[in-house]
Amino acid sequence: MITQVASSVESLTLRINGKDVSCRAGDTILQAVRDNDMELPTLCWLEGLTVWGGCRLCMVEIAGSPKLHAACATACQEGMEVQTDSDRLHRYRRMIVELLLAERNHICSVCVSNGHCELQSLAQKLGIDHVRFAYRNPQLEVDNSHDRMRLDHNRCILCTRCVRVCAEVEGARTKDVKGRGVLAAIIHDLDQPWGESETCTSCGKCVNVCPTGALTHRGVAVGEMTKKLAFLPYLTLMREANP
Amino acid sequence: MNRTITIEGVTRIEGHARITIQLDETGKVADAQFHVTQFRGFEKFVEGRPLTEMPAIMARICGICPVSHLMASSKACDDLLAVEIPPNAARLRRIMNLAQLVQSHALSFFHLSSPDLIFGMDGDPAKRNIFGLIQDHPDFARDGIMLRKFGQDIIGLLGGKKIHPAWTVPGGVSAPLTREHRDQIASMIPDALARALRATEYFQRVRDCYPAEVDAFANFPTMFVGLVSADRLLEHYDGSLLFSDEHGAPVAELREPRGYASLIGEAVEKHSFLKSPYFRPKGYPHGIYRVGPLARLVLAEGCGTPLADRELDVFRQRLGRAPQSSFHYHWARLIEIIYGIEMIQRLLEHPDILSEHVRSRARPNRLEGVGISEAPRGTLIHHYRIDENGLMRWANLIIATGNNNLAMNRGVLQVARRFVDGNRLQEGMLNRVEAVIRCFDPCLSCSTHALGQMPLRIELLTAQGEVCDALQRQD
């Protein structure tokens, strides 16, 4: 049985894009934005996982603050004035996505996630028809050692959704990140081939939360990989309802 | 004084190439070479990628004939999976392959080659292109454009898009044919067939106007290579690879694609990025052979469809069983267009064509696989090796145009010797050197294609490299 949320939660009023909105105390700006049917792009954030704040795509302007704030990691405050879209923000978001595209080998046309990729959709939405930065074209491996799943480092944007879902929802903690900066990479256990991992339960949650073609099922051809995200809010709801 | 003529940017072909003609001291042609100046690197950069991505990646080799690479690549992947694909998947693949054949042949004949045939080899270069055709022969041009549209529309209806559909996958195809699309394709067939027959009839009027070209356009004995069906009929998707002598008599037959290297060797020449395959038992360069529509018609006992067979009978009555001049590629291409349309209709009428069982699923069961199919311009071979995880470790591609490389080079020399006089350089002479290449319909990069608009500069050079004469073709 699902318990009712207490009605005595303190509410706040703030202004987003010139519109007065209310939210619960403790809500992030991202929650307030989306609860009020406004758009704000994200790649690392995913409902049901802890906040990472790594992709910086949800940066917003807050009146009185000279710097930008990650909406997913900033709590709403009474009277706050938030701007989610401006030339400056659009410029930065575009630059972030361009840098993501330039960092590894995102060849959409021959990617298994072509047409079903959050990075590709976002690039299209931001009007990115070319990348102004030199492509790094790193030589990266494809880990095809797992019986059913594949990790293609070429398509990874290091959003760490897979690391978090593995630790927080499945509880296996198989995945982690090694290295720093452009050398960072997703690993399994002690940086061993996925197929040799002793902790992986082969649950497939990491594949479904991955926003790109980095984590996929084996055997899928180009454009065939679709992700099923419905399991995560369902699991979250069930756990909250039956702690 | 020895001089060299360079045709830099051969026009109305698919891709980029250069022709050099070396003259002797009297201004006569001493030698000629066809250089393919592009480097692609597909065989190298697919290393490390999963085999399931291969058909879609390999299709990117070409914007004109991506379907041909889809077929050969998918068949190589089927071989790696060691599966038999569902019969209806094979039927659907055949339809797409034939649609590709029709549209590519239409492009080659109408858009690229027919301007030479209709306006003459010495015609005004400003008019000798598809736009000139549209202006002076709008019905003929429309037939070509609509035949190309017919093929492209079928590819789009089957694969979701007209260029680079990722619909052909290891183990079959990713989606079945819908009733609506079947009916739509069937409704387009009568019009396409009428246009193809009209174009063939029109060709009869011009084909006898070029006796000198018939005589000198790569007119020499070579072997012929191509797929034939089990009952020795025209075949483009499966079957065995037949090698014949210059008279069309079989000398070898390859039933198991993985054994291709025992019959085909690949030579590398310094002057070109395109390899020169040859019939290995005869050695290099004596093992020269030709592939493509002319070779296929030489090798097959018949087409197996009524209208194409009727035209093939006329073809053989006029030219014999094994015509040696590559000028006849044009006619062979038209016969194959008719065949393609008839065969698409036959496949669509199959009672199981709407069957939804179109994919076999398996893991890699073999570490080495080969796929052979017939591209519009000839036999296409994809050969892959993978590791135990299904990642590509090595690839070798023998592209249809490569198979004709030796014949094209020899053809260029033959035409140059016949028509080019270094003492009196005229545009029409050099157009003939290009036109012999167009007979083979080469797809050099497969990714770019010029329509007679590429600037062309021909230079006569002294042995010291000084320009002593030049012809310039403008945009």
Image (cartoon, coloured by chain):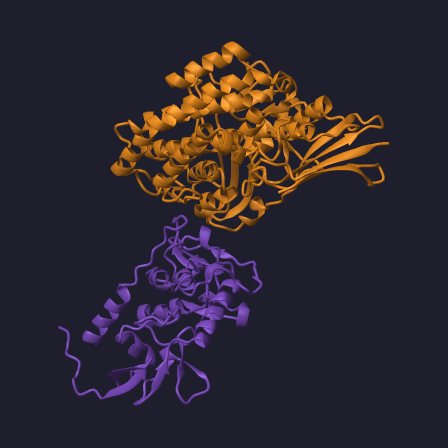
Chain colours: A purple, B orange
Q: Residue furthest left?
A: A1
Quarter of the image for residue B67 reads: top left
Does residue B272 appear left or right of residue A147 in this picture? right
Q: Residue furthest front?
A: B136
User: Please, is residue B48 above or below residue A229 in the view?
Assistant: above
Residue B287 position in % (x across, y down): 64, 23
The C terminus of chain B appears in which quarter of the rendering? top right
Is residue A121 visible in this depiction of the protein?
A: yes
Residue B231 position in % (x across, y down): 41, 17
Does residue B188 appear left or right of residue A120 in this picture? left
User: Please, is residue A179 above or below residue B263 in the view?
Assistant: below
Quarter of the image for residue B87 reads: top left
Observer-nearest residue: A141 or B71?
B71
Q: Residue furthest top?
A: B317
Is residue B242 visible in this depiction of the protein?
A: no
Quarter of the image for residue A52 reads: bottom left
User: Please, is residue B99 above or below residue B394 in the view?
Assistant: above
The N terminus of chain B appears in which quarter of the rendering? top right
Residue B369 position in % (x across, y down): 49, 37
Q: How many marks?
A: 0
For the point 48% across and 33% down, the residue is B104
Observer-nearest residue: B26 or B237?
B26
Observer-nearest residue: B288 or B133?
B133
Residue A124 position in % (x across, y down): 41, 61
